[in-house]
Amino acid sequence: MKLLFEHEEYIDKYDAVALFSGGLDSILAMRVIMDQGLSVLGLHFISPFFGEPQSIAKWRELYGVEVRAVDISDEIIELIQKGPKNGFGSDLNPCTDCHTLMATKAREIMEAMHAKFIISGEVLWQRPMSQRPDAMNIVHRDAKAKGILLRPLTALKLEPTEVEKSGLVDRSKLLGIYGRGRLDQLQLAQSYGFKEVPSSGGGCILTEPKSSVRIWTIFHELEHPTGEDFLLAKAGRFFHYKGCILAINKTLEQAQLLESCAKDSDIVLELADYMGPLAVGRSEKPWDEAVVAQAAALMASYANKAVRNLPVGTPLRVSVKHNKEERFISVLPSRETIFKEASREEMAASLMQVNKAMTEQRMAAKKEKFYTWISRKEYQRQRAREENDK
């Protein structure tokens, strides 16, 4: 976890920290508590898959909330690689485990800052993966935040927390919103006079079908992916082959992105004599010449003007940059190469196996806990018999 601020300067200055996505619910949750005269610092968790740290100043201006960014890239990448204990959702989203991770980090920061509790904008039954009662209880338990994790928007539908019982937070001023409707939140936003009303979600691309397939492919092909690797998934065209990733731009903005994130160890491909796309290939192993030629042929096939205006069968010269050196090869443009697009079916099958394994682990842990309890009871009965025999 990398704090993008020095939490020492915030010691003893805030009553609570908030899980702040930038969505409407997290904003409203902060404001509801701030209305009680309590000071709240929003923690905006960021990773390659979610987060908008560039919006922090805007949030302060529009909604009157104080927010700081916390980078959990390494932790969320490790979580996905190992497989989330509570499984993936319909895509690559480990929502329950991700919320648990955020709540755990928030608790650690809360303790370091001498704050007293944590706020979340979650609403009971609003999301099927992470906002069920059992999922919320898992977050409480695994984040060791029971009694200090308060959900102001849906609190009246939940058991009172310790901060409510102590009187620090006035429970009567909290809300009882639940379900997938948005009317209550929109009316509350209107009462605050918000000039802009954001959407309900935090924009996690792990829940998006197209993005999640590409991200899964990077995890599948690269043994040690880093946050920078996932930038390649934003390219217009995305392919893979046996430990290799190939990203090809569609737009000028995507070309600039690929150019900026290219490493010396990558292969960077573009036409030598004509305008065309830019391709970046990434692998953790040495590049085979035959694979480079296949990647170049695929990239060249998307140089539409060159392919359309030249006679069929005309080879194109391609610039290949690698390890700060440039060379040129000639290839016939082709989309029939060893590189394939990411497959949702492959991802679904893989995640099904992960979810099955995680379920079996959870059941085994419950079984072990049950038999441990049985053994303890039997031991106690045996001791009682021994005492009676004396």
Image (spheres, rainbow, N blue to C red):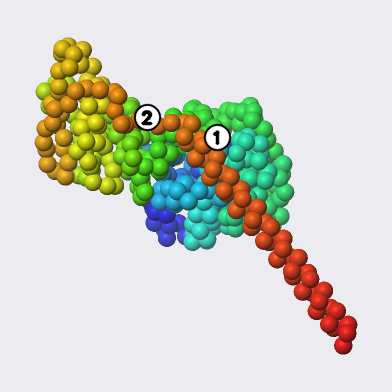
Examine the rendered structure and indicate whether residue 299 appears above or below residue 178: above
Which of the 4 quarters of the picture holds residue 294?
A: top left
Examine the rendered structure and indicate whether residue 178 appears above or below residue 117: above
* Labelled disc at residue 209: none
Q: What residue is rendered at 57% in x and 48% in y?
A: 357
Which of the 4 quarters of the picture holds residue 240?
A: top left
Q: Taking 303 as reference, is 361 left or right?
A: right
Q: Earlier in the sequence, mark 2 or mark 1?
A: 1
Residue type pointed to by label 2: Glu
Examine the rendered structure and indicate whether residue 268 appears above or below residue 9: above
Residue type pointed to by label 1: Ser
Label 2: how many residues lie within 10 Å, few (<14), some (14-19) or many (20+)? some
Q: What residue is rendered at 55% in x and 40% in y?
A: 352
**Label 1 secondary element:** loop
Q: Taking 189 as reference, is 342 left or right?
A: left
Q: What residue is rendered at 44% in x and 34% in y?
A: 213
Direction bottom: furthest residue: 390
Q: Pinpoint residue 355: horizontal percent, then vertical percent.
A: 56, 44
Which residue has dot 1 on it? Answer: 90
